[in-house]
Image (cartoon, rainbow, N blue to C red):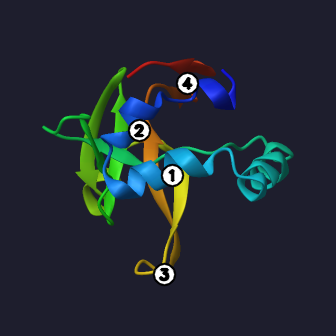
């Protein structure tokens, strides 16, 4: 997928303002430079979001919330609730109100079983 095909203008225009800004920022030279630097570490860029009953179906992910993937199902949970269980953080953002970097997504799609020395789906 190229930057030109990230999202149609008509779809971007119905997103909440914070998410519109995020979508439009992807093509900015300074964001591309950040993505190139992140790629050196095997990291990328995401748009933290929640799902809502709106025209676009999207909402900005509230501070303190985490999207959690379990068994190929996504739920939205408070950071405290998401902290329990065997999951690995997979997305972060800088939150000025949350002491800097905060996890915004976790994946619990598999876990390592030391008894069998294999990865298993829970």
- Cα gap from disc 4 to disc 3, whole angstroms: 38 Å
Q: Which secondary structure, mark 1?
A: helix
Q: Which secondary structure, mark 3?
A: loop
- Cα gap from disc 2 to disc 1, whole angstroms: 10 Å
Mark 3 and mark 2 lie on one chain; the one further toward the N terminus is 2
Mark 4 and mark 3 lie on one chain; the one further toward the N terminus is 3
Find residue 22 and name its label: 1
Q: Quadrant of the N terminus?
A: top right
Categorize mark 4 by other alpha carbons within 10 Å: few (<14), some (14-19), many (20+): few
Please say whether residue 54 is visible from this viewpoint.
yes
- Cα gap from disc 1 to disc 4, whole angstroms: 44 Å
- According to the picture, the residue beneath numbered tag 3 turns out to be 99
Please state which of the two labelled residues, at mark 4 or mark 2, is closer to the viewer: 2
Q: Which secondary structure, mark 4?
A: loop
- CB under 8 Å between callouts 1 and 4? no
Residue under the image location 47 percent in, 80 percent down: 96
Q: Quadrant of residue 14?
A: top left
Please say whether residue 84 is visible from this viewpoint.
no
- According to the picture, the residue beneath numbered tag 4 turns out to be 115
Please state which of the two labelled residues, at mark 2 or mark 1, is closer to the viewer: 2
- CB under 8 Å between callouts 4 and 2? no
In this rendering, position of residue 55 left or right of residue 91: left
Find residue 79 and name its label: none
Categorize mark 3 by other alpha carbons within 10 Å: few (<14), some (14-19), many (20+): few
Q: Choose between 108 and 122: the one closer to the eye.
A: 108
Could you say where residue 106 lies in the image, as x and y percent from the top left? 45, 43
Q: Is residue 116 above or below residue 93?
A: above
Could you say where residue 63 lies in the image, as x and y percent from the top left? 33, 66
Mark 4 and mark 2 lie on one chain; the one further toward the N terminus is 2
């Amino acid at each position: 997928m190229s930057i030109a095909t990230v999202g149609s203008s008509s779809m971007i225009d119905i997103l909440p303002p914070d998410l519109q800004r995020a979508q439009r920022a992807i093509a900015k030279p300074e964001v591309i430079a950040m993505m190139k630097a992140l790629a050196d570490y095997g990291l990328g860029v995401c748009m933290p979001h929640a799902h809502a009953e709106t025209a676009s179906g999207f909402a900005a992910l509230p501070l303190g919330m985490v999207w959690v993937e379990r068994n190929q199902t996504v739920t939205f949970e408070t950071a405290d609730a998401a902290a329990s269980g065997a999951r690995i953080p997979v997305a972060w953002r800088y939150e000025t109100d949350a002491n800097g970097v905060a996890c915004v997504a976790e994946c619990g799609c598999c876990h390592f079983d030391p008894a069998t020395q294999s990865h298993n789906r829970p």
